Structures are given as C-alpha cells and as structure tokens.
Image: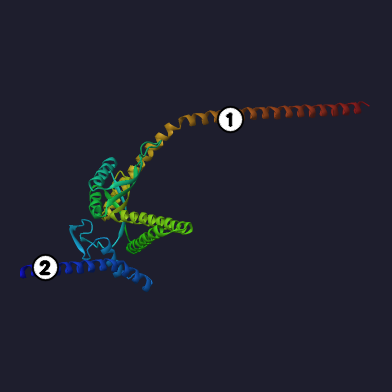
Amino acid sequence: MKKRKAFFLLAALGLALTGCGGNKMAMSDMAAPAAAEEAYDTGGGYASDDIYSYAAKENGYEQEAAAEETQDQESGSPEVLDTSRKLIKNVDLEVETEEFDALLSTIEQKTEDLAGYIEESYTYNGSAYYGRGTRNARLTIRIPASKLGAFLSEVAEVSNVISRNERVSDVTLQYVDLDSHKKALMAEQDRLLELLEQAENIEDIISIESRLSEVRYQIESMESKLRTMDNQVSYSTVYLSVEEVRQLTPVVEQSIGDKIATGFRRSLADVGAGIVNFGIGVIIYIPYLLLWGVLIVIAALVFRALGRKRRSRKSDGESKEERRQEEIKKTLLEAKEEKKDE
C-alpha cells in the first residue's frame, strides 16, 4: 500500500510539473506578439533589439551569430551571417571577354550548379552591314544568398571584371511589421468567424461577412508581400553586363612605355578596321554610287545643252544688231551722198 501511495504521489507530481511547463510555454508564446505590439504602440515604433529578437523567435532562428568557415575569395574575409535580419543583396557586375560564347555558356552552367536561375536575358549578336561587330549581353541572375560570393568569384575567374557594385537593403523592420499585422488580422478573422456562427439576423451576417472579406484580402496581400521579401532575401540578384572585346582592358597599372605601346597597337588596329570598313562600305553602296553618277552625268549634259542654246541665242542677237547698225550706217552714208549731189 505504501508503494502504491508513493507511486500515485510521484505520478501526480509529474503531471503537475508538466502542466506548469506547458502553461509557461503557452504564456511565453502569447507574450511574444503582445510584447512586440506593446513596444510598437507605446514607443511610437519598434526598438531594433526587440524587433530582431522577435523576428528571430517568430521565424525559428537562433539569436547567436553564426560565423561561416568558408572564406570569400573576393574580399579575403569570412562571411558572418546574422540570421535574425532580412537582407536583400543586389550586385551590378560589368565584365569583358575575348570568348563571348564560351563565357555565356560557363555562366549558365555555374548558375545551374549553384541552384540559381536566369530571370532575364538579352543578347546582341553584333551583326551589321559592315561585318560582325562586338557582341554584348545583359543578364539578370538569381543566386541563393549563401552562394553569392562563390558565384561572383567564379565569374571573376573566367572573365575580366571592369566594375562591381554591391547594394544591401535591410528589410527586417518592414518584414516584422507586416508579419505582426498579418497575425493580428488572422486573429480578427477567427473572431469574425465565431461571431458569424453566432449571428442570428441578416444585417449582422452581412456586416460580418463584409468585414471578413476585407480582412481576408488584407491577409492575402500581406502574405504576397512576405513571400516576395522571402524570395528576395533567399535569392540575391546579379545584374550582369558582358561585353566582347578584341583585347582585354588591363587591370593593373601600366608603365609609360607599356601605355604607349598598347595605345599604338590599338591605333593601328583601329586604322586597319577603318580601312576595311571603308572598302566594305564602298562595295555595299556601289548601286547608290552608280545611280548618283548617272544623275550627275544627265544633269551635266542638260546644263551643257542649255548653255549652248543660250550662247547661240546671244550670238544670233549680236549678229542681228550688227546688221541693223550696218544698215543704219549705210542709210546715213547714202543720205550724205544725196545731199552733196544736190
């Protein structure tokens, strides 16, 4: 009997402790959003420490900072990821290459290997009347945020990087605010559903359903925004510009002699390309040149004929005037002779 009594006492004590623990966990879970709302309402906004702590708890992240052992080959320093923050990373990258097709193929393969995808792609093949020119491409690439450094390093290894610009946007405040507002709306939705079950007249039902539709619309809108933010945080965006060149731009400082030699070689190449393009242009525009030549010849013949006609008319007029002057002189001489005879 004593053993049974002791057993029952221990079982009752265990159940009591379990109930207390469960109540404490439930109270802590209920206190988290309440504390966030209280911090927001009383302080005119969230304190940064409360926000990050609340965001970490709501999204299942740990508060301690995790230091990555993988070292970024570009900066030479290890990346430290603060998982309590929502960071959106965008990179503008401009590169050049002498092997355009091979570089594009490599970039596509690296993107696929790192579980990314190409969101948008534009390629100009360089075709023109004067022959093939330099080609270029514009790519919008989405890469998992944890693999962004590896992707940028691999692109730098297979191309010549001209410029690189990185932007980081911290959207933790907006994310926590949207998430808290969504939870408040979901709680209101539950209350409205309970009231709808208890409503007895048509007016109350219509009023509750109208408000319920508004609440559901706001919840869907906020869930859409949260999914968009999660996607932007999870996948960094790389705006990649690729230019095909005949000679890579030097990435190290050159001496004066090297600069002169490089500039002279480029000038010779430009002169040669200009001569070739001029010859191609002449051949291309031969039909136009022939047409203009024929028109010029016709115009010259017309002007020449008009000039001859004008000179002919002028000579005819001069000869008539000379004959008239001779007749006048002859008439005057005859008149003088007649006067002398008289």
Q: Check contact, mark 1 vs mark 2: CB within 8 A.
A: no
Query: Circle 1 is placed at which residue position?
Result: 299
Q: Quadrant of residue 329?
A: top right
- Which residue of the protein is positioned furthest toward the bottom in this rendering? 42
* Residue that lies at the very extreme toward the front in this rendered image: 1
Quadrant location of the C terminus in the rendered image: top right
Q: Secondary structure at mark 1?
A: helix
Residue 12 x %, y %: 14, 68
- Dot placed on the residue nearer the N-terminal end, 1 or 2: 2
| Residue nearest the viewer, comparing 207 with 335 | 207
* C-alpha gap between disc 1 and disc 2: 125 Å
Q: How is the image coloured?
A: rainbow
Left or right? Give the position of 41 relative to 102: right
186 or 335, nearer to the observer: 186
For the point 11% across and 69% down, the residue is 10
Q: Residues within 10 Å of mark 1 (few under 14, many from 20)?
A: few
The residue indicated by pointer 2 is: 8
